[in-house]
């Protein structure tokens, strides 16, 4: 039996990268050939996994309402305690360490680890995202220098775009990068019937700056002049919630845009089944799991023409690509979306290759290769 030790900042089933890995782990447990131990700085939401070979170790350090960089003392404490916990866990025979998120990926730099290590890097923060000198310095040192050069047997990335960025920036991890895109349970979406509601659009994700919800709100200010009945529902929570509420009020869009907060799977599936399109404007982005969820639901995606979004969305075939930061172009794409013909069955076929069973088999093959090497 292989013991997989996974380390991440938070355990939350509403965070794309974590939800994806938990789905993979669930499939691995079904093989009865894996024991999985997940070590986290805080549990926000328990996964629905009940198995004698699955364990969660909650160090209970982080605040549930702030990201790690917003609580640096807790981040330092997390990494300090993590060193001692990992030293005990790696004594298991046939063990693999799989780190996930920026800070856990620094673990190989802080302690000696004599088992194979997989580091997942879902996306890279851009220097442009930091508005202070200290922020830019932090990204340059902690991410671009330390994280990208932490010694891992395999660096797992979700897209060719992230692979290319790491190859450009890393000194030692240029040739050990493996691309395995996220996966979803396609059956869940395929079996949900389409019930289109004229003029309904959906955005899904954490309310943070790099998702560019403010661009969609600004675009809807234009859209509302020509299509006053159009609606935008935003599913997700985060630190930008208050600012977005104020922006919606400033543009007098309370009848057009609704912040739903965190929603359960049933609500999300219902809204996707009714939407004309998903709007996804995230960058820098590692992949965009919600794009797969939209395509599997049979709805097109309106996205910025930036990698890796344009690796998934094909213009006028599976959605509409818009010039980056082009608010007026975005508004036009929303207004004109019904002029294009997007057949639900074709969109769903695009999502088939990202089925979670296919993706889980790729991870199983990767883990077995590391043990047998």
Image (tube, rainbow, N blue to C red):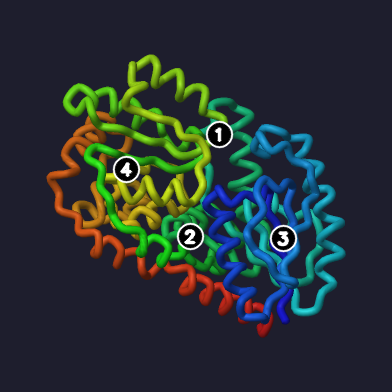
Q: Position of residue 67 (x, y in %)?
A: 64, 37
Does the image show residue 159?
Answer: yes
Q: Residue at x 35, y 30 (%)?
A: 215
Which residue in the protein does label 2 denote? 158
Q: Secondary structure at mark 3?
A: strand
Q: Residues within 10 Å of mark 1 (few under 14, many from 20)?
A: some
Q: Residues within 10 Å of mark 3 (few under 14, many from 20)?
A: some
- Label ID, residue 151: none
Which residue in the protein does label 4 denote? 304
Q: Mark 4 and mark 2: span between their CA atoms? A: 18 Å
Of badges 4 and 1, nearer the viewer stands 1
Q: Mark 3 and mark 1: span between their CA atoms? A: 24 Å
Q: Mark 1 and mark 2: span between their CA atoms? A: 23 Å
- The reply to whether dot 3 and dot 1 touch (C-beta < 8 Å) is no
Of badges 1 and 2, nearer the viewer stands 1
Q: Position of residue 131 (x, y in %)?
A: 54, 26
Residue 76 horizontal side relative to residue 104, left or right: right
* First in residue order: circle 4 vs circle 2: 2
Which quadrant would the N terminus be assigned to in this image? bottom right
Residue 296 horizontal side relative to residue 88, left or right: left
Which residue in the protein does label 3 denote? 38
* First in residue order: circle 4 vs circle 1: 1
Q: Position of residue 224 (x, y in %)?
A: 24, 25
- The reply to whether dot 3 and dot 2 touch (C-beta < 8 Å) is no
Of badges 3 and 2, nearer the viewer stands 3
């Amino acid at each position: 039996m292989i013991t997989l030790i996974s380390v991440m900042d938070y355990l939350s089933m509403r965070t794309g990268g974590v939800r994806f890995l938990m789905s993979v782990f669930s499939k691995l447990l079904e093989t009865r050939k894996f024991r999985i131990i997940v070590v986290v700085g805080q549990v926000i939401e328990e996964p629905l996994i009940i198995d004698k070979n699955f364990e969660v170790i909650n160090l209970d350090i982080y605040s549930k309402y702030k990201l790690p960089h917003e609580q640096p003392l807790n981040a330092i404490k997390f990494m300090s305690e993590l060193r001692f916990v990992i030293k005990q866990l790696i004594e298991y025979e046939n063990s693999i360490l799989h780190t996930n998120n920026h800070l856990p990926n620094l673990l190989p730099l802080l302690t000696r680890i004599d088992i194979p290590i997989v580091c997942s890097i879902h996306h890279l923060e851009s220097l442009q995202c930091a508005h202070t000198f200290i922020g830019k310095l932090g990204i340059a040192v902690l991410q671009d220098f330390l994280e990208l050069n932490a010694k891992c047997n395999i660096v797992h990335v979700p897209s060719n775009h992230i692979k290319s960025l790491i190859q450009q920036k890393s000194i030692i991890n240029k040739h050990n990068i493996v691309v395995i895109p996220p996966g979803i349970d396609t059956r869940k979406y395929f079996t949900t019937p389409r019930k289109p509601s004229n003029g309904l659009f959906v955005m899904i994700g954490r309310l943070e700056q790099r998702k560019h919800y403010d661009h969609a709100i600004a675009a809807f200010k234009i859209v509302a002049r020509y299509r006053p009945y159009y609606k935008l529902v935003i599913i997700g929570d985060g630190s930008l919630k208050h600012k977005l509420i104020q922006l919606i009020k400033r543009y007098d869009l309370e009848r057009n845009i609704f912040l739903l907060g965190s929603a359960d799977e049933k609500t999300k599936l219902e809204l996707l089944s009714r939407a004309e399109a998903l709007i996804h404007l995230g960058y820098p982005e590692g992949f965009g799991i919600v794009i797969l969820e939209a395509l599997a639901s049979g709805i097109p995606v309106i996205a910025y023409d930036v990698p890796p979004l344009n690796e998934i969305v094909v213009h006028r075939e599976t959605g509409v690509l818009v010039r980056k930061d082009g608010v007026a172009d975005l508004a036009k794409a929303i207004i004109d979306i019904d002029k294009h013909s997007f057949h639900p069955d074709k969109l769903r076929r695009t999502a088939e290759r990202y089925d979670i069973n296919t993706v889980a088999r790729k991870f199983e093959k990767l883990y077995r290769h590391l043990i047998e090497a």
